[in-house]
Amino acid sequence: MASATANAASKPASPSFGRRLESCIHALLIGCAAISIFTTVGIVLVLLVESLQFFRDVSIVEFLTGTKWTPLLSPKHYGILPLVCGTMLVAGGSALIAIPLGLGTAVYLSEYASPTVRDVVKPLLEVLAGIPSVVYGYLAVVVVSPIVRAVLPSAGLFNAVNACVVVGIMILPMIVSLSEDVLRSVPRSLREGGYALGANKFDVTVGIVIPAAFSGVVASFLLAISRAIGETMAVSLAAGRTPKMTLDPRESVQTMTSYIVQVSQGDTPADSPEYRAIFAVGLALFVLTLAMNLVAQWILRRVREQYE
Amino acid sequence: MSLAEHTNGRPYAKAASKLFAAACGGCTLLCVLTLLFLLWNILAYGWGLLSWDFLTSFPSRFPEKSGIYGSLIGSLYLIGLTALFAVPVGVGAAIYLEEFAPPSRWRSFVQTNIANLAGVPSIVYGILGLGLFVRSLGLGRSVVAGALTLSLVVLPIVILASQEALRAVPRSIRQASFALGATQWQTVWHQLLPAATPGIMTGVILALSRALGEAAPLVALGTATYVGFVPTLSTLWQDDFSAMPMQIFTWTEEPKKVFHEIAAAGIVVLLTVLIAMNAVAVLIRHRFSKRLSW
């Protein structure tokens, strides 16, 4: 490719070749960008087509409002609410762990830490973010579960607390780095205005910086929770596989993602409704995470405009 | 600072301020300690089982004979092919968005779409791969189907990192190139891409690290958890394969404790490959940043 362009440049006698090459490349690059559009279209099409098949067997009202999810037992029930409940239990619990810890760390890194500490801590958090999800699943089973059962003796081997702890650790780096970015983008003049009025560091941080960055910080929480909702491997290893409507974190629950894993792993026939249910569950998962991401991005874009 | 600690009328203000600083510092310390605790646990469980035999044996029902060879080679093929698919397309899309597309509604639509794709759970990509590559294109549970799916998972990462790298190249480089009569593409190929390579490479390695650790899309594709052979170049699009995260997942699911130790050893191998890849990225960045200076 390099020699072709070089030739075109050195031979002004054939400008049409150069120009044709240029427009070929332009078209090729448009194609590359279009692949991202096709991906979205592909996801929506695959999920919709297979879900419509599924909704021929199961009524959409039962799917959305039923409180029993037993596709692999008989009698079969396809109410997605227990899976949604399990998903929300895990996402909510992990947010309870990750939000205070993550916001505290972000405030420390942005307002208090010396450059040296920042340079050490930020790469370490990147390591935390780079650990694969299946490794967190292993840690949930081998390390976290014994600790949880020692503290809460009534908890089973697989329980929602396990999942909350590891997913909380997983989404922590995301909250820290996004929130820290927003906190740091608060203009210096606001802080100095506070100090000029006699506020101390605490007053400035809690009374000025955090409120000024509030919407951006909330957006980082939304992105992190959406990540927790879509988290798969760690949750299906840690939380067990019992779909139920409970908010008791000591119990074993099943999330939307871990149902998809369970069916994909088993030998369920591909043309059965219990298999097609993974597409309907996938569609629900896609819509839920997409909505949260869109809101978060909208907030972040507004924050960026505000301080630029 | 002395003015900032003015406490007139609020006797506890100073103490509260100190306490808050300590609490925030404590959060940070807790994050770092958690990381060290987790890594130490993996090493402590897995180190004892690491051996040459572990690296060169196939998985087995008997824990003492089990090894990671099949899925290690499978993973290497997988990320190799993922790089082959995702890097040209990702960099191409980034060049288009940064250098060719005029600011328009179409461009911001593509850009929003990419940001959304980055947030789609990876298992949903697995379902897409199942419908599109495994079934419609008839690729089965092959390495090629897995790599195509993972390419879609990491594409947003490659695009966003490459865009940022291109944006960091000073405007003057483009203007100088155009002033000498270079076309748009000649400017991109001879000036911008070499200058942006360190940034692009960082993004590519980040993307491939993600691809190496992803298990969820592979589970949805129905990737095998036990194979007694390694993929070969001539049968990449038909034979079953396994990958390290799948293997670790299977071992962790086993109720027997011995298999958990094997899983830990597998994780050590996986993390070693991850660290090696990131070291390569650092080296490349270092080399390129020395050659180019503005």
Image (cartoon, helix red, strand yellow):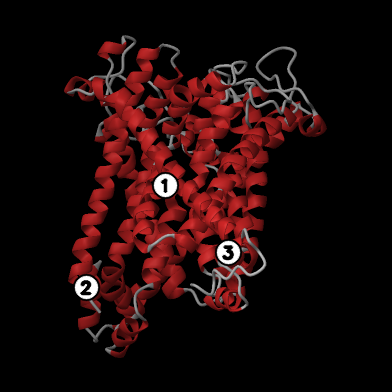
Amino acid on which the number 1 mark rests in the picture: Ser
Q: Mark 3 = which residue?
A: A205
In the shown orientation, is residue B84 left or right of residue A13? Answer: right
Q: Helix, strand, or loop for circle 1?
A: helix
Q: Quadrant of residue B71?
A: top left
Q: Quadrant of residue B108?
A: bottom right
Instruction: For the N terminus of chain A, give its image quadrant.
Output: bottom left
Q: Mark 1 = which residue?
A: B151
Q: Mark 2 = which residue?
A: B292
Q: Of the residues tagged 1 and 3, which is closer to the observer?
A: 3
Amino acid on which the number 3 mark rests in the picture: Thr
Q: Is residue B95 visible?
A: yes
Residues marked 1 and 2, same chain: yes
Residues marked 2 and 3, same chain: no
Q: Nearer the viewer, residue A293 or B149?
A: A293
Q: Helix, strand, or loop for circle 2?
A: loop
